[in-house]
Image (spheres, rainbow, N blue to C red):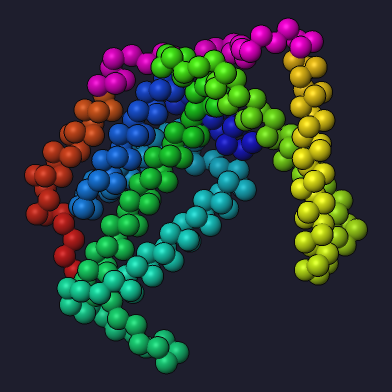
Amino acid sequence: RGIDELAYQSRLRQWPPLGKFLLTLSLLIVALTTDSILIPLMTFFIGACLLVYSTGLRFPRMIGMLILDGLVVILVGCLVIALITKGGGEVARFDVMGWTLTLDRDGLNLSTLVLMRALAGITIMLAFITSTPVPHFAMALRQLRVPKEIMELTVLVYRYSFLLLEQLETMTIAASSRLGFKGIRNSLRTSSRLAVGLFSRSLSMAERSQVALNCRNYKGDFPIYRPPRRLTLAWVIGPIGLAIIIYIIDNFLEPIWRISW
């Protein structure tokens, strides 16, 4: 829900959803299909600028903790890559608790490239997610002739998933207050009962929701007061042209920017 609130308050919300999606896809493709660090570095800078302009880095506490957790996992993974990848000559050697760890040039090069690719992907995807409400993106898919049923299911699943999460949170708190998670055996039994209970409640919620939608003369469409902008030719040429320009710049500056520890 925090991401949804950020999307509706974003400064980039008025940009065409399909244009932002095409920009994100172009930058991701060009960042993941190169062996040079320059392109991931440039895409990371572009994504960071868009993210700062979109949200001002005002993330909810839970979203911020999830981002930090993801960054820790990425750093640990890159450290493992640097330690297990050999070749190119030894750079450093460490003695940790009786273990001898060595860093080679190929390991440092590969781990740095993976790190920059991961950071670039995270910032670009966050910039897109925090600036594009799901209903806006679903409505924009009409321009691509996506079947109406797919858009309807997308919006329904998105909206009612929050209700299911609230139900699950309430059931978990109730079970925890009754010591339902004390011990492995009780935890497994309580988790299975929560799964069954959530499934039955989801069926009941679906029936009540269908009645509520029929009372509101639901015809398969979710009207939006201010519809998103449509994809134009400029938003097709712009992202593709930007990706090509980044690729050309990388070819000119490759001897300078290629890592060589």
Q: Residue furthest right?
A: 178
Give the percent coordinates (x, y) of residue 235. Answer: 31, 20
Residue 57 seen from this side: yes
Q: Position of residue 147 (x, y in %)?
A: 50, 17
Residue 156: percent from left, percent from top: 65, 25
Vertical relation: 87 (above or below) 96? above
Task: Name the residue located 60 percent from the left edge and 24 percent from the top edge.
Answer: 153
Where residue 18 sits: x, y (%)? 40, 22
Q: Quadrant of the C terminus?
A: bottom left
**Residue 200 located left or right of residue 83:** right
Residue 259 quadrant: bottom left
Give the mark count: 0
In this rendering, the answer to whether 257 lies above or below 5 is below
The magenta stretch spans which residues? 214-237
As drawn, 196 above or below 96: above
Q: At x 28% / y 14%, what residue is drawn?
A: 233
Q: Furthest-bottom residue in view?
A: 98
Q: Is residue 230 magenta?
A: yes
Left or right of 104 in this view: 230 = right
Image point (80%, 24%), residue name: 207
Q: Main secondary structure of the magenta part?
A: loop
- Residue at figure coordinates x 66%, y 9% from the top left: 219
The image quadrant of residue 95 is bottom left
Name the residue nearer the viewer: 136 or 148: 148
Vertical position of residue 67 compared to residue 111: above or below: above
Tell me if residue 14 can be seen. no
Classify residue 167 as left or right of residue 88.
Answer: right
Seen from the viewer's position, the closer of residues 156 and 134 is 156
Q: Is residue 17 left or right of residue 169?
A: left
Q: Quadrant of the N terminus?
A: top right
